[in-house]
Amino acid sequence: MNSKLLQQVRILDPVSHTDRVADVLIIDGKIAAVEENISEFPTKTDIQDCRGLILGPGLVDLYSHSGEPGFEERETIESLMQASRAGGFTRLAILPNTFPPVDNPAGLARLQNLATQANDKSAFPLLYYWGAITQGVKGEQMTELGELATTGVVGFADGLPLENLSLLRRVLEYLKPLNKSVALFCNNSGLAGNGVMREGYDSIRLGLPGVPSMAESSALAAVLELVDTIGTPVHIMRVSTARSVELIEAAKSRGLPITASTTWMHLLLDTQAIEGKSHLDTEFVPYDPNLRLEPPLGNKSDRLTLVQGLKDGVLDAIAIDHAPFSYEEKTVAFSEAPPGTIGLEIALPLLWQNLVETGELSALDLWRVLSTTPSKCLGLSPGEIRPQELAEVTLFAPQEIWVVEKQTLKSRSINTPWLGKQIQGRVLELKF
């Protein structure tokens, strides 16, 4: 029997709306008891004083990228799983843009086999896989959606804009009876042009081509029209503009079957960070290529609206969108860098420090949009902290200070603007 007692830990459980201090007894990987004080437990129980620590359901990432297969120098399945565990994520949904992509059953089986080989007998993270909507994720021709749906994909997403509205219409019509999640990234490439940051005062001052917010909102408006007519439930990925939040709020008020997420970086930073400035207690390198994202960081009003959208429930979840790139790929001029940044290991500490500690989000709200609602968006039952439940939990030390360095990260890539910086808060390893 493997028994562990977490004494006087702060429990955050969004499902039961619980925020309290209690003891938690875990036996053989299952929660045996949650009580104010537990005095009876098996002999040889590992007892841990958890005063000042936080225990919540395991975090869930809606969409992230794997380098393997095809780009192992960026990230392997093994290093991705290790980074996920280190960041407190017990469920991870992987986008299909590997090489070859997950656009047929053989591609999915290949990825599943790699995950099996990489598993070090840890129970978590549980991996889920998005199946590609289009062949080669090129946005030109549908995959065999019905065939892929029977192979165990959690849903369908290219992770890239699907701008052919006629094709998108057929996709939504085909997917409606399959009862699978479909996630769409809204962007009009014609309006975005060669832009590399959000259009506005800062882009003009910095001399970088801008992406107008309408590139996102116009594409989103078209998707909402299709959903309104066809009725297929859709998840909107990577919401980054204030106008998009308004459109989503209006659509939800009309009863459209949509959910939406933004990414953790768009909640913390805006265009000023590209100049090296920030409202956070952190300075960044001007024109840091690790701040080149897709969609680009928004203006200040966008960032504030995204936070408010989470508080109001207009936005359902925070995604990490972990996108590893090699040092050589990212060590180029800002406008030439591939868009993306890693985040699995540092997202929770930075969100807690800069949203919860500042009072912009409650602790329960943050945990809800990182665990409970992402599970629901994937069509999964959310984890709970109650007796007889599997101990799929995250233990977090909000006051622990550490430095983000290559040797402290599990991810194979280090493309983050926080590299070399000190942050507060760290997930602690739990072994059962």
Image (tube, rainbow, N blue to C red):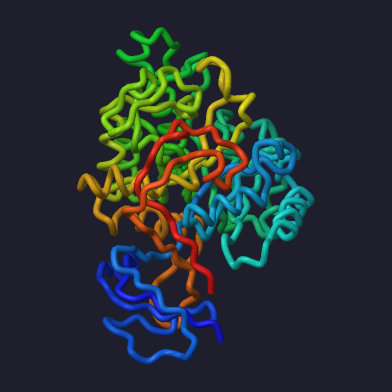
For image coordinates 35% across by 23% down, the residue present is 271
Residue 392, x across and y down, in percent? 48, 68
Whether residue 254 is visible to the viewer of this picture, yes or no, is no
Residue 153, x across and y down, in percent? 64, 55
- In the displayed structure, 365 sits above or below 273; it is below
For image coordinates 30% across by 46% down, the residue present is 353
Q: Quadrant of residue 8?
A: bottom left
Instruction: Count numbered badges in the picture.
Output: 0
Q: Nearer the viewer, residue 132 or 70?
A: 70
Q: Nearer the viewer, residue 263 or 87?
A: 87
Q: Nearer the viewer, residue 21 or 149?
A: 21
For image coordinates 37% across by 78% down, the residue present is 24
- In the displayed structure, 28 sits above or below 153; it is below
For the N terminus, the quadrant is bottom right
Q: Residue lying farthest right?
A: 106
For image coordinates 40% across by 18% down, the residue present is 286
Residue 20, x across and y down, in percent? 25, 70
Whether residue 155 is visible to the viewer of this picture, yes or no, is yes
Drawn side of residue 94 relative to residue 26, left or right: right
Residue 145, x across and y down, in percent? 68, 49
Q: Nearer the viewer, residue 277 or 208?
A: 277
Q: Residue lying farthest left?
A: 359
Drawn side of residue 37 relative to residue 348, left or right: left
